[in-house]
Every structure is written in C-alpha cells, then in structure tokens.
Image (cartoon, grey):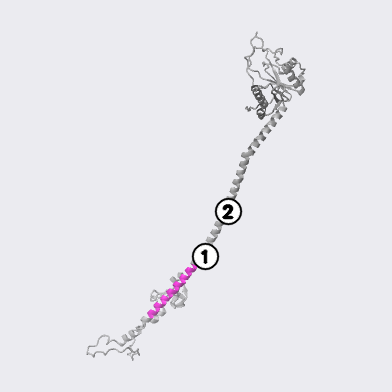
Amino acid sequence: MTKCGMCKKYIPRGDIAKCAKCAKCSSPYHPYCIKEGEGLIPATWICPACSKDKPMEAAPSTPVRPAGPAPPVAAAPPASPAPPASHAPPTALTTASPRRSALELLELPEPVAADHRLNSTANDTTEEFKVELGLEIRLFREALTAVQEEIRLFRSEVMELKSSFIASDQRLTELGSRVDILEKRVTDGTGSRLEAVIAELRQDLNDKDQELLDNDVEITNLPEENGENPTHIVLSVAVKLGVQVQESDIVSAERVGPRNRWHQAPSGESGAGAGAGAGRPRPLVVRLTRRALKDQLIAAARVRRGATSADLGQSSAPRPFYVNERLTKVNRQLFHQVREVGRRQSWRFMWTKKGRIYARQGQDSPRHWIRKADDIVRVFGVPYTL
C-alpha cells in the first residue's frame, strides 16, 4: 500500500484518487496534510520535499552580489603539470558572470537529492508490495481454511450418505430374504393347505344343502301334460305304491328344470312302447312334512320296481317311473360318476340313503361311503372327473 509523503500513513487504494500528487516525484499526499488541500490542487503542484531541492531564481531587478571567495573544496589528487599558458583569447566559460557561477553551485546537490527520492520511492514500493502480499497471503490462507472446512463437512456428509445406503441395502436384503421364505412357504405347503381348506368348506356347504333336502323326493320319467295337477299326481303315485299319503302331508309339489318338448302318443296306440320317442319329461319334486313318510315312499318304490304311469289318470302312454331321494347338484353328479365307474368295475350295488352315496362290490362285501371325488379313487382305484 502507498504511504502519504507527509504523515507517512498508508493510503487505501480507493482514496489514492482523492490525494494530491506531486508533479515531480509522484508521491501522494493527504489533502488535509497540505495547505493547498483546502481548495483545488493544480496538476503542476510540487511537494515540499521537491520544493526544497529546486534552485531559487532571482528576479531581474535583484542586484547581483559580487562573487566572494570560493568555498573550500576537497583536495584533489595531484595532477600532471599543466602545459604553459598560451595567450589565447578568453572563452565563454572564463568570462561567465558571477550570477551563473552561483546558480551552478546551487544546482550541484540536485543529483544527490534525486537519488535519495528514487531510493525512498523504491523503498515505499517494496514496503507496499510486502504489505499487499501479506494481505493476499492472509486472505488466501483464510480462503484455504474455509475450503478445507467445506471439504471436511462434505466428506462427513458423504460418509453419512454411505452409511445410510449401506443400512438401506441391508434392509432390502433382509426384506428379499423374508419374501423368499414366504414364497417358499406358499409354494411348499401353504398353497396346498389353503386348497384343502377351501375343498373342506365346499364339502361342508354341500352337506348343509343336502340336509335341507332330507324331506324331498324326486319322481322321474313321469309323463308331463299341460294343465296337470302335481299334488294329485303325487297322491296317485302313493296309492299305486301302497303308501297312505294325505294332501296335508305334501308341503309342495312341482316340476323343476327347463321345460322340454313333450309329444303325446297318437290316439289308438297303447303299450309301453308308446311315446318312447318323445322327449324326457322334467322330474317332479315333492317336499313332505315328515322324513319317515319319505322313507316309506322310497322303500315301496324299490319293492315295486318297474311300476309304470298306468292307472294314474294320464292320457299319455304308460312309462316306468322312479322314486329316489333328491340330491344336490354336486351329489347328483358324484352319484352319476359312481354308477358309471361301478358298472365298468363290475360293482353290483350303488345307492343313496339319507342323502349319502354308498357302493358295495358284492353281497358279502362291505359298503363304502363316497363323500367326495377323492373317495372314488380310494374305493374304485380310478380317477374321478366331472
């Protein structure tokens, strides 16, 4: 930094433009350190130091003082003898006025003062450079310290992120292992166990539905006519089978299933073969008030196996009819499959009792209760397909 030539204090860079500057040595001065600082400072202003070294010029009207004795000078080394003086005419140097000699004497110290000013300016520049370099180094160190602190904080944050990533990776690995274990459990045993539970629930529902049909009987292959009275037909069938049934014993009687096209036999034709080519009539479902009455009807129908619709008051050709227990859709399909498999395996007896399906291979063989599809494989040794 630059120092003031008067108070020797450092001048900030921003204030140098406001300072006075010597036109000769270029040294800056505070405006308040010089008398001229109160007004406008001319560009030709010269500092006091340079003003002291400037020779004084006499005014034209000032009288010239005669030259006195010369001041003592340092002894010069002995010189060689001078040649003899010649009678040459006087030159300009020898005829100079005393005023010129005085000026020359006054100007002799000027080179020494200039060298002193140059040395002072160089020293000031060196000191200014040292101060500025020190400040810059200090600022650089402070900036470097701040950068190091930022790097340290950044590294700590990176380490925290790394730790978080490692923990997240471990958790994901643990979750993946747990998912694999769960999938293995499902594929190994849970899936089959659930399927078994579902099958058991379906079987329980089927058994409940079958219990609701305990008092129902189903009369099949009985000719269907327009305007028939199902209750009257049931009473006629009971009379034909020899079972005493009152109208009050019948809760409901109706045909079930989609209606088929039924063709009556031509007039004049009779016999078992009449109407054989007609469509199969819908079954007649009867709900009785008592289960014992249902069992009596089924037992009488088995005793009188082959009874026909003759003497029932129908205009259609006589057809054999069958009285059986009413089964659910699942049990009906299962019983049909049992009969088909039993015939192929030469089993003699397949029947239903109280909604249950039974099978026996021979007269002295034990009976088997077939409750579900797996029982067909267990009893007959063949697969079951619906």
Using the rendered view, name the quadrant where residue 99 is placed. bottom left
Q: Quadrant of the N terminus?
A: bottom left
Outermost front residue: 364
Q: Earlier in the sequence, mark 2 or mark 1?
A: 1
Answer with left or right where residue 207 lies relative to residue 120.
Answer: right
Q: Does residue 168 sit above or below 11 in this rendering?
A: above
- Tell me, for residue 29, which label it has, or none: none
Q: CA distance from mark 2 to mark 1?
A: 29 Å
Image location of residue 332, percent across then percent down? 67, 25
Check if residue 123 falls in the magenta segment: yes
Q: How many residues crowd mark 2 within 10 Å: few (<14), some (14–19), many (20+)? A: few
Residue 377 versus residue 309: which sits nearer the camera?
A: 377
Using the rendered view, name the quadrant where residue 297 is placed. top right
Residues rendered magenta in the picture: 113-139
Answer with left or right where residue 104 lies relative to residue 350.
Answer: left
The kind of residue tagged 2 is: Ser
SS majority, magenta: helix
Q: Secondary structure at mark 1?
A: helix
The kind of residue tagged 1 is: Thr
Image location of residue 172, percent across then percent down? 59, 48
Q: Is residue 40 visible?
A: no
Front position among marks 2 and 1: 2
Answer with left or right where residue 69 lies relative to residue 157.
Answer: left
Q: For mark 2, what is the residue?
A: 164
Residue at screen point 62% across, 39% down: 188
- Tell me, for residue 145, which label it has, or none: 1
Image location of residue 371, percent across then percent down? 69, 28
Image location of residue 185, percent across then percent down? 63, 41
Residue at screen point 60% across, 47% down: 175
